[in-house]
Amino acid sequence: MKVAIYPGSFDPMTLGHLNIIRRASRIFDKVVVCIMVNGSKDRAMFTPEQRVDMARRVTAHLPNVEIDYYNGLLAEYARRFDHPVIVKGLRASMDFENEFTMASINKKLNPDMETMFLTASDKYTFVSSSNVKEIARHGGDLRDFMPRELIDEVTEMARKEK
Ligand code: ADP
C-alpha cells in the first residue's frame, strides 16, 4: 500500500490544502495528513486538537484520508510507514526554496522517504493559512479561501483574539 504523508501546520485548513489532499487521495492508496505542532510559524490560532477536529470534518467524505498529529520531526514520524512519500503543495516561487531545503534535510534524516510536489491549483496560489487569519481578523469574506463549514469558527476565534 502506497502511503502519502501531507505535513503542515493547517492552522486552519484552507481550500488550497484541501485541493492538495483531494488530488493526492486519487494518486495514493492512503493519505495521512499530519498536523505538525512544532513549527516556527506565526502564532497559532487553533490548538492541535482543534486543527485535527476541523481537518477530520472537512475530509470526512474522502475514505482514504486520515488525520494525525505529531510533535517532533517529520523524518521520525515517517518511520512508521514503509517507504512513505511526503507530499507538499508548491505555490510559485515563495514555497520553492524552503521546500527544496526541507526535502534535502528530510532525505538526509530518513533516506527511506521521498518528497513529491503538487503544484497549487491556479485558484488557490494566493491562499495561505496566514492570509486567512489576517482576513478573518479584519472581518473579510472568507468564502473563496476556506471550507464553508469552518468559516464561523475562524471568524469567532479572530473576534475573541481582539
Ligand atoms: P501555510 O503555508 O498555508 O501556513 P502549511 O504550513 O500548513 O500552510 O502548509 C502545508 C503544506 O501545504 C505546504 O506544503 C504548503 O506549501 C502547502 N500549501 C499551503 N497552501 C497551499 C495552497 N494554497 N495551494 C497548494 N499548497 C498549499
Image (cartoon, rainbow, N blue to C red):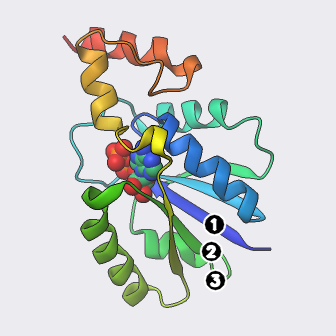
Q: Front-most of 30 and 95?
A: 95
Residue at 77% x, 35% y is 61
Which residue in the protein does label 2 denote? Answer: 80
Q: CA distance from mark 2 to mark 1?
A: 12 Å
In the drawing, does residue 23 fall left or right of residue 46? right
**Earlier-in-chain disc, 2 versus 1:** 1
Q: Tell me what residue is drawn at x 63 percent, y 66 percent.
A: 4
**Residue type at the position of mark 2:** Arg
Mark 2 vs mark 1: in front: 1
Q: Helix or strand or loop: what does disc 3 sit on?
A: loop
* Residue 50 spot, x, y in % from top left: 49, 30
Give the CA distance from mark 3 to mark 1. Answer: 9 Å
Name the residue located 39 percent from the left edge and 86 percent from the top edge. Answer: 109
**Number of callouts in the render?**
3
Above or below, 83 relative to 124: below
Q: Which residue is labeled 3 in the image? A: 83
Quadrant position of the N terminus in the picture = bottom right
Give the residue type at disc 3.
His
Viewer can see residue 78 = yes
The structure residue drawn at horizontal position 56% and vertical position 18%, both measured from the top left corner, is: 148
User: Which of the labelled discs sits on residue 4, or is there none?
Assistant: 1
- The image shows residue 107 at horizontal and vertical percentages of 42, 85
Helix, strand or loop under label 2? helix
Quadrant in which the C terminus is drawn: top left
| Distance (Cα) linking label 2 and label 3 | 9 Å
Question: Horizontal and vertical percent for residue 80?
Answer: 62, 74
Q: Nearer the viewer, residue 103 or 52?
A: 103
The vertical placement of 135 against 114, above or below, is above
